[in-house]
Image (cartoon, helix red, strand yellow):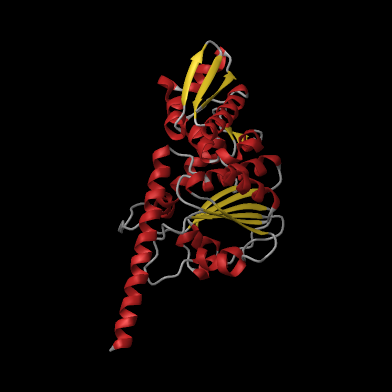
Amino acid sequence: MTDMELAIPYEHQSNLFGQFDSNIKLIERELSVRFILRGDTLRVVGPKSKVEAAKHVISELYELSKRGNVISEQNVSYALSIQDKLEEHPMMEMDSDLICHTLSGKPIKPKTIGQKSYVDAIRSKMIVFGIGPAGTGKTYLAMAMAITAFQKGDVNRIIMTRPAIEAGEKLGFLPGDLQSKVDPYLRPLYDALYEIMGADSFLKNMERGLIEVAPLAYMRGRTLDNAFIILDEAQNTTPAQMKMFLTRIGFGSKAVITGDNTQIDLPKDQTSGLDVAVSVLSKLEDISFIKLTSKDVVRHPLVQKIVNAYEEYEKNQQSKSKKGRRSRYVEDRRA
Protein backbone atom coordinates (compact mmCIF):
# COMPACT_ATOMS: atom_id res chain seq x y z
CA MET A 1 0.00 0.00 0.00
CA THR A 2 1.11 3.54 -0.72
CA ASP A 3 -0.35 7.03 -0.64
CA MET A 4 0.05 10.28 -2.53
CA GLU A 5 -1.18 13.84 -1.98
CA LEU A 6 -2.63 16.22 -4.58
CA ALA A 7 -3.47 19.90 -4.13
CA ILE A 8 -7.05 20.65 -5.24
CA PRO A 9 -8.23 24.26 -4.59
CA TYR A 10 -11.63 24.69 -2.93
CA GLU A 11 -13.22 26.32 -5.99
CA HIS A 12 -12.66 23.17 -8.07
CA GLN A 13 -13.53 20.51 -5.54
CA SER A 14 -17.31 20.39 -6.04
CA ASN A 15 -16.92 20.27 -9.83
CA LEU A 16 -14.22 17.62 -9.68
CA PHE A 17 -15.91 15.43 -7.08
CA GLY A 18 -19.37 15.57 -8.69
CA GLN A 19 -22.81 15.61 -7.11
CA PHE A 20 -22.78 13.57 -3.88
CA ASP A 21 -19.09 12.79 -4.65
CA SER A 22 -20.23 10.54 -7.53
CA ASN A 23 -17.09 11.16 -9.62
CA ILE A 24 -14.70 10.36 -6.80
CA LYS A 25 -16.69 7.26 -5.84
CA LEU A 26 -16.52 6.03 -9.44
CA ILE A 27 -12.72 6.39 -9.47
CA GLU A 28 -12.47 4.64 -6.09
CA ARG A 29 -14.60 1.76 -7.31
CA GLU A 30 -12.80 1.31 -10.64
CA LEU A 31 -9.23 1.63 -9.32
CA SER A 32 -9.65 0.15 -5.81
CA VAL A 33 -8.21 3.25 -4.12
CA ARG A 34 -9.45 5.49 -1.34
CA PHE A 35 -9.57 9.30 -1.29
CA ILE A 36 -9.25 11.40 1.86
CA LEU A 37 -9.84 15.15 1.59
CA ARG A 38 -8.36 17.51 4.16
CA GLY A 39 -8.79 21.17 3.26
CA ASP A 40 -7.32 21.61 -0.21
CA THR A 41 -5.23 18.43 -0.02
CA LEU A 42 -6.52 15.21 -1.54
CA ARG A 43 -4.80 12.06 -0.31
CA VAL A 44 -4.94 8.89 -2.41
CA VAL A 45 -4.38 5.53 -0.70
CA GLY A 46 -4.06 2.13 -2.37
CA PRO A 47 -1.74 -0.15 -4.36
CA LYS A 48 1.13 1.80 -5.92
CA SER A 49 0.11 1.25 -9.57
CA LYS A 50 -3.51 2.15 -8.82
CA VAL A 51 -2.52 5.29 -6.91
CA GLU A 52 -0.41 6.41 -9.87
CA ALA A 53 -3.35 5.82 -12.22
CA ALA A 54 -5.71 7.73 -9.88
CA LYS A 55 -3.24 10.62 -9.77
CA HIS A 56 -3.21 10.87 -13.58
CA VAL A 57 -7.02 10.71 -13.77
CA ILE A 58 -7.52 13.38 -11.08
CA SER A 59 -4.83 15.63 -12.58
CA GLU A 60 -6.39 15.42 -16.07
CA LEU A 61 -9.88 16.16 -14.75
CA TYR A 62 -8.52 19.04 -12.65
CA GLU A 63 -6.98 20.58 -15.77
CA LEU A 64 -10.34 20.30 -17.53
CA SER A 65 -12.03 21.99 -14.57
CA LYS A 66 -9.50 24.85 -14.66
CA ARG A 67 -10.48 25.43 -18.30
CA GLY A 68 -14.07 26.01 -17.24
CA ASN A 69 -15.52 22.59 -18.10
CA VAL A 70 -18.24 20.95 -16.03
CA ILE A 71 -16.85 17.53 -15.14
CA SER A 72 -19.41 14.86 -16.04
CA GLU A 73 -19.56 11.15 -15.35
CA GLN A 74 -18.74 10.62 -19.01
CA ASN A 75 -15.48 12.60 -18.57
CA VAL A 76 -14.53 10.46 -15.58
CA SER A 77 -15.40 7.18 -17.30
CA TYR A 78 -13.40 8.11 -20.37
CA ALA A 79 -10.38 9.23 -18.34
CA LEU A 80 -10.46 5.86 -16.57
CA SER A 81 -10.68 3.98 -19.89
CA ILE A 82 -7.53 5.71 -21.25
CA GLN A 83 -5.58 5.97 -18.00
CA ASP A 84 -2.47 4.49 -19.68
CA LYS A 85 -2.43 7.43 -22.15
CA LEU A 86 -3.09 10.30 -19.74
CA GLU A 87 0.58 11.25 -19.39
CA GLU A 88 0.31 12.57 -22.97
CA HIS A 89 -2.66 14.77 -21.93
CA PRO A 90 -5.00 13.74 -24.77
CA MET A 91 -8.03 15.25 -23.01
CA MET A 92 -6.33 18.66 -23.00
CA GLU A 93 -5.69 18.38 -26.73
CA MET A 94 -9.34 17.48 -27.33
CA ASP A 95 -10.57 20.31 -25.14
CA SER A 96 -8.50 22.80 -27.16
CA ASP A 97 -10.16 21.74 -30.41
CA LEU A 98 -13.26 23.96 -30.56
CA ILE A 99 -15.37 23.27 -33.65
CA CYS A 100 -18.20 25.76 -33.05
CA HIS A 101 -20.89 26.73 -30.53
CA THR A 102 -24.53 25.72 -30.46
CA LEU A 103 -27.22 28.37 -30.59
CA SER A 104 -27.33 28.32 -26.77
CA GLY A 105 -23.58 28.90 -26.56
CA LYS A 106 -22.54 25.34 -25.71
CA PRO A 107 -19.10 24.56 -27.20
CA ILE A 108 -18.84 21.58 -29.53
CA LYS A 109 -15.54 19.72 -29.20
CA PRO A 110 -14.35 16.15 -29.74
CA LYS A 111 -14.61 14.29 -26.43
CA THR A 112 -12.61 11.15 -27.17
CA ILE A 113 -9.40 10.25 -28.99
CA GLY A 114 -11.47 8.55 -31.70
CA GLN A 115 -13.62 11.65 -32.17
CA LYS A 116 -10.48 13.82 -32.39
CA SER A 117 -9.11 11.56 -35.15
CA TYR A 118 -12.48 11.77 -36.91
CA VAL A 119 -12.58 15.59 -36.80
CA ASP A 120 -8.94 15.85 -37.93
CA ALA A 121 -9.67 13.51 -40.85
CA ILE A 122 -12.66 15.63 -41.93
CA ARG A 123 -10.41 18.69 -41.96
CA SER A 124 -7.68 17.06 -44.04
CA LYS A 125 -9.42 14.56 -46.34
CA MET A 126 -11.92 14.96 -49.18
CA ILE A 127 -13.96 11.88 -48.22
CA VAL A 128 -14.23 10.47 -44.69
CA PHE A 129 -16.04 7.37 -43.52
CA GLY A 130 -17.04 7.49 -39.84
CA ILE A 131 -17.96 3.97 -38.77
CA GLY A 132 -19.02 3.06 -35.27
CA PRO A 133 -21.84 2.29 -32.82
CA ALA A 134 -24.66 4.56 -31.72
CA GLY A 135 -23.70 7.48 -29.48
CA THR A 136 -20.21 8.08 -30.84
CA GLY A 137 -21.11 11.48 -32.33
CA LYS A 138 -20.59 10.49 -35.97
CA THR A 139 -23.47 12.52 -37.41
CA TYR A 140 -23.41 15.35 -34.88
CA LEU A 141 -19.71 16.13 -35.33
CA ALA A 142 -20.03 15.89 -39.12
CA MET A 143 -22.92 18.35 -38.95
CA ALA A 144 -20.91 20.73 -36.77
CA MET A 145 -18.01 20.60 -39.23
CA ALA A 146 -20.38 21.18 -42.16
CA ILE A 147 -22.02 24.23 -40.56
CA THR A 148 -18.61 25.66 -39.62
CA ALA A 149 -17.34 25.25 -43.19
CA PHE A 150 -20.55 26.83 -44.54
CA GLN A 151 -20.39 29.82 -42.19
CA LYS A 152 -16.71 30.40 -43.03
CA GLY A 153 -17.48 30.32 -46.75
CA ASP A 154 -15.36 27.22 -47.42
CA VAL A 155 -18.40 25.64 -49.11
CA ASN A 156 -21.45 27.22 -50.74
CA ARG A 157 -24.03 24.76 -49.44
CA ILE A 158 -24.71 21.82 -47.16
CA ILE A 159 -26.37 18.66 -48.46
CA MET A 160 -27.52 15.95 -46.05
CA THR A 161 -28.96 12.67 -47.14
CA ARG A 162 -29.79 9.20 -45.87
CA PRO A 163 -31.53 6.13 -47.31
CA ALA A 164 -35.25 5.97 -46.48
CA ILE A 165 -35.22 2.55 -44.82
CA GLU A 166 -37.43 1.57 -41.88
CA ALA A 167 -35.54 0.37 -38.79
CA GLY A 168 -36.81 -3.20 -38.70
CA GLU A 169 -40.52 -2.39 -39.02
CA LYS A 170 -42.94 -1.48 -41.78
CA LEU A 171 -44.57 1.91 -41.37
CA GLY A 172 -47.01 1.49 -44.23
CA PHE A 173 -48.58 4.46 -46.03
CA LEU A 174 -47.59 7.89 -44.71
CA PRO A 175 -50.00 10.80 -45.32
CA GLY A 176 -49.11 14.20 -46.74
CA ASP A 177 -46.94 15.52 -49.55
CA LEU A 178 -43.52 14.14 -50.48
CA GLN A 179 -41.67 16.26 -47.90
CA SER A 180 -43.99 15.03 -45.16
CA LYS A 181 -43.36 11.43 -46.20
CA VAL A 182 -39.56 11.66 -46.01
CA ASP A 183 -39.26 13.96 -42.96
CA PRO A 184 -39.52 11.12 -40.39
CA TYR A 185 -36.45 9.45 -41.89
CA LEU A 186 -34.46 12.71 -41.86
CA ARG A 187 -35.52 13.95 -38.41
CA PRO A 188 -32.13 13.24 -36.73
CA LEU A 189 -30.46 15.54 -39.25
CA TYR A 190 -32.99 18.31 -38.60
CA ASP A 191 -32.49 17.98 -34.84
CA ALA A 192 -28.75 18.56 -35.11
CA LEU A 193 -29.23 21.50 -37.48
CA TYR A 194 -31.75 23.18 -35.18
CA GLU A 195 -29.47 22.84 -32.16
CA ILE A 196 -26.35 24.18 -33.84
CA MET A 197 -27.72 26.68 -36.37
CA GLY A 198 -31.17 27.53 -35.04
CA ALA A 199 -34.53 26.92 -36.72
CA ASP A 200 -34.84 30.40 -38.26
CA SER A 201 -31.39 30.39 -39.86
CA PHE A 202 -31.86 26.81 -41.06
CA LEU A 203 -35.25 27.53 -42.68
CA LYS A 204 -33.97 30.71 -44.32
CA ASN A 205 -30.97 28.92 -45.85
CA MET A 206 -33.13 25.97 -46.83
CA GLU A 207 -35.55 28.25 -48.71
CA ARG A 208 -32.59 29.74 -50.59
CA GLY A 209 -31.40 26.24 -51.53
CA LEU A 210 -28.17 26.57 -49.54
CA ILE A 211 -29.09 23.75 -47.18
CA GLU A 212 -30.71 20.62 -48.53
CA VAL A 213 -31.99 17.58 -46.65
CA ALA A 214 -33.16 14.83 -48.98
CA PRO A 215 -33.45 11.05 -49.40
CA LEU A 216 -30.50 9.35 -51.04
CA ALA A 217 -32.55 8.52 -54.16
CA TYR A 218 -32.64 12.25 -54.99
CA MET A 219 -28.85 12.31 -55.50
CA ARG A 220 -28.93 10.36 -58.77
CA GLY A 221 -27.92 12.34 -61.85
CA ARG A 222 -26.50 15.29 -59.91
CA THR A 223 -22.98 16.72 -59.65
CA LEU A 224 -22.35 18.35 -56.28
CA ASP A 225 -19.68 21.08 -56.47
CA ASN A 226 -18.54 23.33 -53.60
CA ALA A 227 -20.69 21.48 -51.11
CA PHE A 228 -20.30 19.73 -47.77
CA ILE A 229 -22.19 16.46 -48.20
CA ILE A 230 -23.18 14.11 -45.37
CA LEU A 231 -24.51 10.63 -46.01
CA ASP A 232 -26.01 9.30 -42.77
CA GLU A 233 -27.00 5.68 -41.97
CA ALA A 234 -24.76 4.50 -44.80
CA GLN A 235 -24.99 0.88 -43.63
CA ASN A 236 -28.48 0.86 -45.19
CA THR A 237 -27.25 1.70 -48.68
CA THR A 238 -26.87 -0.94 -51.36
CA PRO A 239 -23.50 -1.18 -53.17
CA ALA A 240 -25.09 0.51 -56.20
CA GLN A 241 -26.43 3.38 -54.08
CA MET A 242 -23.05 3.90 -52.42
CA LYS A 243 -21.29 3.99 -55.78
CA MET A 244 -23.91 6.41 -57.09
CA PHE A 245 -23.43 8.72 -54.09
CA LEU A 246 -19.63 8.74 -54.18
CA THR A 247 -19.59 9.55 -57.89
CA ARG A 248 -21.79 12.65 -57.30
CA ILE A 249 -18.95 14.49 -55.50
CA GLY A 250 -17.59 17.39 -57.53
CA PHE A 251 -14.84 20.01 -57.27
CA GLY A 252 -14.45 21.91 -54.01
CA SER A 253 -16.66 19.45 -52.15
CA LYS A 254 -16.13 17.39 -49.03
CA ALA A 255 -18.12 14.28 -48.10
CA VAL A 256 -18.62 12.50 -44.78
CA ILE A 257 -20.25 9.07 -44.76
CA THR A 258 -21.44 7.78 -41.39
CA GLY A 259 -22.74 4.38 -40.48
CA ASP A 260 -22.93 1.53 -37.99
CA ASN A 261 -22.43 -1.84 -39.67
CA THR A 262 -23.96 -3.63 -36.68
CA GLN A 263 -27.37 -2.02 -37.34
CA ILE A 264 -28.15 -2.93 -40.94
CA ASP A 265 -31.86 -2.76 -41.83
CA LEU A 266 -31.52 -4.10 -45.37
CA PRO A 267 -33.07 -7.46 -46.33
CA LYS A 268 -30.93 -10.36 -45.09
CA ASP A 269 -29.81 -11.35 -48.58
CA GLN A 270 -28.68 -7.77 -49.43
CA THR A 271 -25.03 -6.71 -48.97
CA SER A 272 -24.44 -3.33 -47.33
CA GLY A 273 -22.89 -0.66 -49.53
CA LEU A 274 -20.85 0.49 -46.54
CA ASP A 275 -19.16 -2.90 -46.16
CA VAL A 276 -18.37 -3.01 -49.87
CA ALA A 277 -16.95 0.53 -49.80
CA VAL A 278 -14.60 -0.36 -46.94
CA SER A 279 -13.23 -3.28 -48.98
CA VAL A 280 -12.99 -1.44 -52.31
CA LEU A 281 -11.76 2.02 -51.28
CA SER A 282 -9.53 1.43 -48.25
CA LYS A 283 -6.26 1.94 -50.19
CA LEU A 284 -7.24 5.16 -51.99
CA GLU A 285 -5.59 8.42 -50.96
CA ASP A 286 -7.81 11.32 -49.87
CA ILE A 287 -10.26 8.81 -48.41
CA SER A 288 -10.05 8.16 -44.69
CA PHE A 289 -11.79 5.42 -42.70
CA ILE A 290 -12.21 6.21 -39.00
CA LYS A 291 -13.38 3.31 -36.83
CA LEU A 292 -15.06 4.48 -33.63
CA THR A 293 -15.65 2.00 -30.79
CA SER A 294 -17.67 1.71 -27.60
CA LYS A 295 -14.95 3.79 -25.89
CA ASP A 296 -16.04 6.73 -28.05
CA VAL A 297 -19.67 6.63 -26.89
CA VAL A 298 -20.50 10.03 -25.38
CA ARG A 299 -24.07 9.40 -24.31
CA HIS A 300 -25.04 8.13 -20.86
CA PRO A 301 -22.40 5.63 -19.58
CA LEU A 302 -25.08 2.95 -19.65
CA VAL A 303 -25.17 3.23 -23.47
CA GLN A 304 -21.49 2.23 -23.56
CA LYS A 305 -22.28 -0.84 -21.46
CA ILE A 306 -25.19 -1.72 -23.75
CA VAL A 307 -22.95 -1.46 -26.83
CA ASN A 308 -20.32 -3.67 -25.16
CA ALA A 309 -22.95 -6.23 -24.15
CA TYR A 310 -24.31 -6.48 -27.71
CA GLU A 311 -20.80 -6.75 -29.17
CA GLU A 312 -20.06 -9.65 -26.82
CA TYR A 313 -23.38 -11.30 -27.69
CA GLU A 314 -22.76 -10.97 -31.44
CA LYS A 315 -19.25 -12.46 -31.08
CA ASN A 316 -20.70 -15.44 -29.22
CA GLN A 317 -23.39 -15.90 -31.88
CA GLN A 318 -20.81 -15.81 -34.67
CA SER A 319 -18.66 -18.33 -32.80
CA LYS A 320 -21.63 -20.69 -32.36
CA SER A 321 -22.53 -20.31 -36.03
CA LYS A 322 -18.98 -21.22 -37.12
CA LYS A 323 -18.95 -24.27 -34.83
CA GLY A 324 -22.33 -25.36 -36.23
CA ARG A 325 -21.11 -25.08 -39.82
CA ARG A 326 -17.90 -26.95 -38.95
CA SER A 327 -19.77 -29.84 -37.28
CA ARG A 328 -22.17 -30.13 -40.24
CA TYR A 329 -19.20 -30.22 -42.61
CA VAL A 330 -17.58 -33.05 -40.60
CA GLU A 331 -20.83 -35.02 -40.58
CA ASP A 332 -21.24 -34.59 -44.34
CA ARG A 333 -17.67 -35.80 -44.89
CA ARG A 334 -18.29 -38.88 -42.78
CA ALA A 335 -21.48 -39.62 -44.66
Up/down of 176 relative to 22, above or below: below
**Quadrant holding the C terminus:** bottom left
Q: Nearer the viewer, residue 195 or 5?
A: 5
Q: Percent position (x, y) of residue 312?
A: 39, 54
Q: Nearer the viewer, residue 324 or 264?
A: 324
Residue 333: quarter of image = bottom left
Task: Give the residue at x 68% y 61%.
Answer: 250
136 with respect to 60 (left or right): left
Up/down of 247 relative to 214, above or below: below
Task: Give the residue at x 63% y 24%.
Answer: 67
Up/down of 38 relative to 109, above or below: above
Q: Percent position (x, y) of residue 45?
A: 49, 24
254 with respect to 188 (left or right): right
List the single residue furthest toward the top. 39
Residue 204 in sight here: no
Q: Percent position (x, y) of residue 134?
A: 45, 48
Residue 287: quarter of image = bottom right
Task: Give the residue at x 66% y 38%.
Answer: 88
Residue 99: quarter of image = top right
List the single residue furthest toward the bottom. 335
Residue 260 in sight here: yes
Task: Give the residue at x 52% y 61%.
Answer: 218
Q: Percent position (x, y) of residue 156?
A: 67, 48
List the single residue furthest toward the front. 1
Task: Report the label total.
Answer: 0
Up/down of 233 relative to 143, above or below: below
Q: Nearer the viewer, residue 116 or 187?
A: 116
